[in-house]
Image (spheres, rainbow, N blue to C red):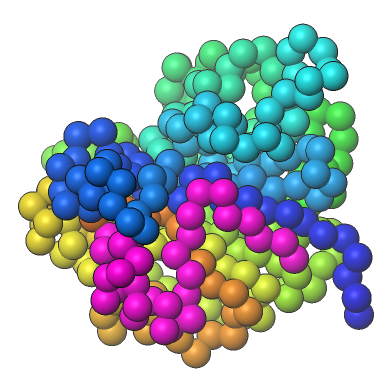
Amino acid sequence: MFWQVVVKLKIIGSAAGGGFPQWNCNYRLSRDVRSRQTGLTPRSQSSIAASADGANWVLFNASPDIREQISNTPELQPDANGPVRNSPIKAVVLTNADVDHIAGLLTLREKEAFNLYASARILETLASNPIFRVLDETLVKRIELPLGGTTQLEGPDGPLGIEIETYAVPGKIALFLEDSSDPVNFGSDEGDTIGVRIAAPGAPDSKAVHYIPGCARVTDDLRQRITGAGCLLFDGTVFTDTEMPDAGVGAKTGARMGHIAMSGDDGSLASLKDTSIARRVFVHINNTNPVLDPASPEREIVTNAGWEVGHDGQEVEL
């Protein structure tokens, strides 16, 4: 069957928290991209945008770099022939409550109507933090996403032609919610972190994109959900679990941060090797990850395994 409805997606931020280069990072990759070494390109923090008609857009996560991302993406800018205040951004979907996914909501506070979708756990986190009251609830409607269910996304003026399925994936609670007296109990499978299937209503799996920018491990249930997908945008935070300690930039491993490594027996390359996915792209890439260097052996490993390394401005159309 030929599927006529096309959902266009655009990666507007492909880096993990802090971006690339991170403002205070002097690790070799950040130094190289600042000095404009061949092949290395700056990346803003994690977000994608989707549209069924090219006029009305949905953001998946609102990064701290959202103003810059809008400036770099003409489709997300106000209509020059429209009212004095207007925006094509009609909805925002959150996949967790990490700072790099919610801080951009504060930039969207300027009395512009849009719908805000998130799991119950994520909405509870926003509601408990008074700073998010700057989002006028008469203009920004909060809508709970059912885990394991589907939702027809709507903007203030009606349906947007995009259907999403939301499901819990292994992850962790947001960093600012961690209990410092309990450094072990930081993981969560209860909806703090979700994956999203994005497609036109009723579209087959081959015309769907799964967006999972944060994932602690690949489970059998997750593998089954994404089998047959047209595209997977997946957590590419670190190449090795001990990458950050090895680089001397911090003590936390990928697992401690709730992010699966690319490499290793339990990494994403091995865990998804035999899963049928037409196109697979790493996003949410940390500034220490050597795959950011196209000349690195790690990039060659990823490419040979059939993966792409996502970049800002990259488009996906199914």
For the point 41% across and 38% down, the residue is 100
Question: Would you say 79 lies left or right of 249 here?
Answer: right
Q: Is residue 258 above or below residue 312?
A: below
Query: Is residue 277 visible in the rendered structure shown here?
Result: yes
Task: Give how far across and how far down residue 200 sits, in percent.
Answer: 81, 59
For the point 79% across and 73% down, the residue is 204
Residue stretch in magenta: 289-318
Q: Give yes or no for residue 317 being in the magenta stretch.
A: yes
Query: Residue 210 appears in which quarter of the rendering?
Result: bottom right
Query: Residue 35 appears in which quarter of the rendering?
Result: top left
Q: Quadrant of the C terminus?
A: bottom right
Q: Is residue 219 above or below residue 64?
A: below
Query: Residue 309 appears in which quarter of the rendering?
Result: bottom left
Task: Give how far across and how far down residue 135 sits, in percent.
Answer: 59, 18
Task: Give how far across and how far down residue 305 sits, in percent.
Answer: 43, 83
For the point 87% across and 60% down, the residue is 5
Q: Quadrant of the N terminus?
A: bottom right
Task: Give how far across and how far down residue 91 sits, in percent.
Answer: 70, 35
Question: Would you say 27 lies left or right of 142 here?
Answer: left
